[in-house]
Image (cartoon, helix red, strand yellow):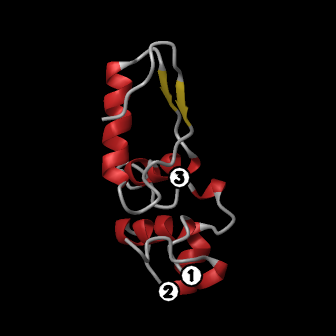
Amino acid sequence: EVCISERGLLVFGGDATDGGHGDIRVTKNLISLKERHPDQVVLLQGNRDVVKLRFGSELHPEETPGSGDKHWDYKYDEYLKDRNLESNRTSGCKWILCTMGCETERGRTNTFEDR
């Protein structure tokens, strides 16, 4: 169990779940530490934490797939055209993964190849 001194302060900069082995253990320890020392622990969201929130918002039934493409250089319509795909939730999910770096095409790497 991780502890913090009485006068200590921990500021965690995010991206706890992007290193592979031990992701769940690290996350549980951070949450436990925050619960035990709410005024001494600050948990910030990293860029990779924030981008994962896209799944819940962009794939919501009331959203149009690709609605978040204003933040990416590779637009949803372009993605669909390149792959001859129809616009639907499955294509939307694949596009999100593509813009997260999960494809080798367009200079991107396989983010999840070791998971």
Q: Position of residue 28 (x, y in %)?
A: 31, 40
Marker disc for residue 29? none
Task: Classify the position of the N terminus by image quarter.
Answer: top left
Residue that mark 1 sits on: 81
Q: Quadrant of residue 4?
A: top left
Q: Is residue 20 above or below residue 11?
A: below
Residue that mark 3 sits on: 48
Left or right: 61, with 48 as reference point: left
Task: Classify the position of the C terminus by image quarter.
Answer: bottom left
Q: Image point 43% across, 66% down: which residue?
A: 92
Callout 1 amino acid: Lys
Q: Of the residues tagged 3 and 1, which is closer to the observer? A: 3
Instruction: Give SS at disc 3.
Output: helix
3 and 2 marks in contact (CB < 8 Å): no
Q: Residues within 10 Å of mark 3 (few under 14, many from 20)?
A: some
Looking at the image, the residue that sits furthest to the right is 73
Callout 2 amino acid: Asn
Residue that mark 2 sits on: 84
Left or right: 83, with 38 as reference point: right
2 and 1 marks in contact (CB < 8 Å): yes
Callout 3 amino acid: Arg
N-terminal-most mark, 3 or 2: 3
Instruction: Give SS at disc 2.
Output: loop
Q: Quadrant of residue 3?
A: top left
Q: Is residue 13 above or below residue 71?
A: above
